[in-house]
Image (cartoon, helix red, strand yellow):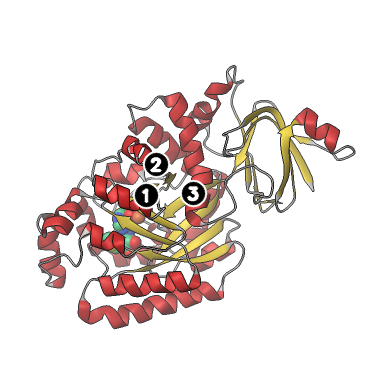
Amino acid sequence: MKILSASWIITCNEDSTIIKDGAIVFDEKIIDVGTKEYIENKYTGIEIEFLGENSVLMPGLINSHVHLEFSSNATTLKYGNFMQWLNSVIASREELVEKATSKLISKKLSKMLKSGTTTIGAISSYSLDIEPCLNSPINTVFFTEVIGSKADMIDNLFADFKARLNSAKKNESKSFIPAIAIHSPYSVHPFLVREALNLAREEKLAVSSHFLESPEEFEWLHRDEGGFLEFFKNFLGQEKSVTKPMEFLNQFKDIDNLSFTHCVETSIDDLEKIKELNAFVNHCVTSNRLLNNTKLDIDRLIDFKVPFTIGTDGLSSNNSLSMFDELRNCLMIHTHKNPISFSKSLLKAATVNGAKALGLQKGQLAKDKDSDIIAINLPDTIKDEEDLCMNLILHTKFVNKVYIGGKNA
Ligand code: MCF
Ligand code: FE
């Protein structure tokens, strides 16, 4: 059992409690959280480690959506327009994935850990990221991705997907949890979607899919027109989309831990359906800015009571995998939101919402939750409690301490 105390504790619990001069008691799970005075009196004779001036304790950050296999990209891929990005991915994918060695991915993971990430939702296209994920102390929900829209390829693609899913399942542990990613409505044949989702239901696996990321995707799915038409004709000899947005969403009934990534072009009907499915939206603000120059309508999500999480996406559409960098971008891009109150929502999106989307007992400093805890020291004192979350987002690059499952990571 260990006790830490700090100037501030941001619990990210259901009541969004913030404790001044607080302490936390934990082993593998959190045992107690309260004011330092309360903890001192209750747990007499146990040493309390004080984390220093202007220290903050909070739940470890959860990056709900990242493509580690694209970690070697820095300046190769084209940004600014989705079709140009997609064409550049097709042109450079092999070279990029080859350069993303286990060593490189491990390096990126240790930087993510130092910047406060304790759990990731890793979208795996080729299963080349299994080993570095297994070797990292970071908890991984490992989403084996299924992709392919051509009917005559389905059997082969499904067999390959199942083999990759099985190798993830062989490595299942408390900190490595197999899950399923459907790439997107435009790139996965409905038969493949159906079969993959049946597996998810049988084996109670979390599911995630990209959904309505670009205006071109909207045009293609609704009208079989726009930038995707040429792309599909050229690469796959296809002139019609394999599905419609609502038809796609309707396939996801009775999936327990479900999330849709991006959702920048969703209609009101789509959002209503996403709500009905109890799904989360993975918000990747930097990726949306770089690939499409669009942004998610957060207020509409709030109106429809659809919760959102924060993901960096991969280095294929971001210059950083740090959650604090991503939170800063999010704070800066949603210009109509009040920075003080929005910062509080952002920290919950990056912790408790991420945990719920991935089906984990994490993301809150509350009794019986997993002890995934980060400690930060702010550069100066906080006069008004209200300003704490915003200043944390503005000033944090790296964290001072990370505990995962109660162990110093
Ligand atoms: O999320 C971004 C943009 N949207 C779609 N896919 C990807 C992203 N970053 C990497 N990808 C991967 C995807 O998992 O690109 C591959 C897929 O395997 C090729 S298809 C665009
Ligand atoms: Fe993505």
Q: Do callouts 2 and 1 mark residues in contact (Cβ within 8 Å)?
A: yes
> How much space separates mark 3 and mark 2, taking CA atoms?
16 Å
Mark linked to residue 305: 2
Q: Label 3: which residue? A: 354
| Lower sequence index among marks 1 and 3 | 1
Numbered badge on residue 211: none
What amino acid is found at the position of numbered circle 1 in the picture? Answer: Lys
**Three-letter code, disc 2:** Lys
Q: Residue under circle 1?
A: 275
Of residues 6 and 347, the one drawn nearer to the viewer in this rendering: 347
Residue 316 visible in this rendered orientation of the protein: no
Q: Does label 2 or label 1 sit earlier along the sequence?
A: 1
Residue for point 48% across, 64% down: 142
The Cα–Cα distance between marks 1 and 3, rounded to whole angstroms, is 16 Å
Which numbered mark, 1 or 3, is in the foreground of this view?
1
Residue 36: horizontal and vertical position, in percent? 76, 30
Rendering coords of residue 112 (x, y %): 52, 49
CB of mark 3 near ligand 2 (< 8 Å): no
Is residue 253 visible in the rendered structure shown here?
yes
Q: Is residue 371 above or below residue 254?
A: above
Alpha-carbon span between mark 2 and mark 1: 7 Å
Which element carries disc 2, helix, strand or loop?
Answer: loop
Query: Which of disc 2 and disc 3 is earlier in sequence?
Result: 2
Vertical placement of 24 versus 120: above or below?
Answer: above
Nearer the observer: mark 3 or 2; the answer is 2
The front one of 40 and 50 is: 40
Furthest residue toward top: 383
Residue 196 occupies quadrant = bottom left
Q: Ligand 1 is located in which of the four quadrants?
A: bottom left
Q: Position of residue 364 (x, y in %)?
A: 60, 43
